[in-house]
Image: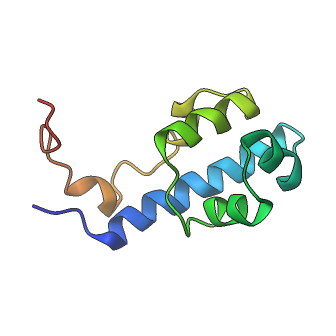
Amino acid sequence: MNISDIELNVVDQHVGRMVRLHRKAAGLTQTDMAAMLGVMPRQLRKYEAGQERISPLMLRDMCVAMDIRPIELFDTMDRNASSHRNFVPGRFGRS
């Protein structure tokens, strides 16, 4: 069973929206946060729009910059969304 690109995009878009929400709540502009992360503001815009997937290391750095835990970017996802239906435990080398 494969996770489709469309389903992954749902997650990317959700995480991007949550990054934007938490960035603003932390009082950071895109320019400020991009500088903290060592990326161009254009790259941060792509992350926030869900147009580009955020690597685990970048995600960690974003959370440090916003003073949040990574789970806070995911805990509002709809548990019944299609992006969760095809999840197969152990599929990625973990059981």
Q: Which of the 4 image quadrants contains residue 31? A: bottom right
x then y, percent, for residue 65:
74, 33
Colour mode of the rendering: rainbow
Q: Quadrant of residue 14?
A: bottom right
* Residue visible at 59% across and 26% down in the picture: 69
- Percent across and percent down for residue 72 are 58, 34
Position of 83 compared to 87: left or right? right
65 in relation to 28, above or below: above
Give the quadrant of the C terminus.
top left
Count of numbered badges drawn on the protein: 0
Tell me: residue 89, above or below residue 44.
Answer: above
Residue at x-position 73% and y-position 26%: 67
Q: Point out the image quarter for the N terminus.
A: bottom left
x and y, in percent, of residue 9 in the image = 43, 67
Q: Is residue 95 left or right of residue 71?
A: left
Q: 57 and 80: which one is in front?
A: 57
Residue 74 position within the rendered picture, expressed as x and y whole percent measured from the top left: 50, 42
Residue at (15%, 32%) from the top-left corner? 94
Residue found at the very far front of the displayed protein:
38
Q: Is residue 35 left or right of residue 84?
A: right
